[in-house]
Amino acid sequence: MMEPVTALVRYMQHVDGAVVPPVFANDGLVIVEDFAPYVFKGKGAAARWDAHFRQHAARLKDLRRDFGAAHDFDRNGDRVYFVLPTTWRGVYLEARRFEEHGAWSFVLEKSSGHWLIVAYGSGATDRTDWPVQVP
């Protein structure tokens, strides 16, 4: 069940030369993000999200994430819902290290034996940054 989430994170950490893995549902996808235009939904949502994420990621380096234990887990047939406490770390614009705490809320649906992301919302609860130390 976590495979589409971890595949998405692997992609987000290394977009150069990579293709978005097939983790998103074809119909009804909704993504709420912290980069413009913030909401990606409807036909072509995954492709629009990818284009905007690539622009966003171009300013990031050494992106890493840690997940806390999933909570608010619920299942209704072939749909699951859960929240993942998430910490992102990396370098922004080659000059600032950051650590961002927040959560990802996911809705996944099982289709043809595979879990796919139908929706996710991402939000930060706090962020700390500091200058990159040059050796």
Image (cartoon, rainbow, N blue to C red):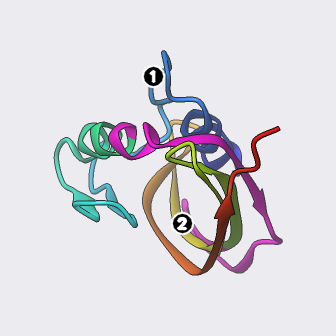
Local SS, label 2: strand
Local SS, label 1: loop
- Residue 24, position as x, y percentages in the image: 43, 43
Which residue is rendered at x = 16% and y = 46% of the image?
43
34 to the left or right of 103: left
Which residue is rendered at x = 53% and y = 58% of the image?
108
Residue on which the image places disc 1? 19
Residue 58 covered by magenta stretch: yes
Q: Which residue occupies the foreground of this view, 2 or 74?
A: 2
Q: Residues within 10 Å of mark 1 (few under 14, many from 20)?
A: few
Numbered tag placed on residue 106 in the rendering: 2
Which residue is rendered at x = 63% and y = 37% of the image?
7
Q: Is residue 114 visible?
A: no
Q: Mark 2 or 1 closer to N-term?
A: 1
- Residue 133, position as x, y percentages in the image: 76, 49
Which residue is rendered at x = 20% and y = 41% of the image?
44
- Residue 118, position as x, y percentages in the image: 41, 57
Residue 64 covered by magenta stretch: yes
| Residue found farthest to the front | 135
Q: Nearer the viewer, mark 2 or mark 1?
A: 1
Which region shows up in magenta?
54-83
Q: Main secondary structure of the magenta part?
A: strand
Which quadrant of the rendered structure holds the C terminus?
top right
| Residue found farthest to the top | 17
Q: CA distance from mark 2 to mark 1?
A: 21 Å
Q: Say which amino acid is labelled 1.
A: Val
54 to the left or right of 104: left
Q: Say which amino acid is labelled 2.
A: Phe
Q: Is residue 36 visible?
A: yes
Q: Residues within 10 Å of mark 2 (few under 14, many from 20)?
A: many
Relative vertical location of residue 109 with respect to residue 121 in this rendering, above or below = above
129 to the left or right of 117: right
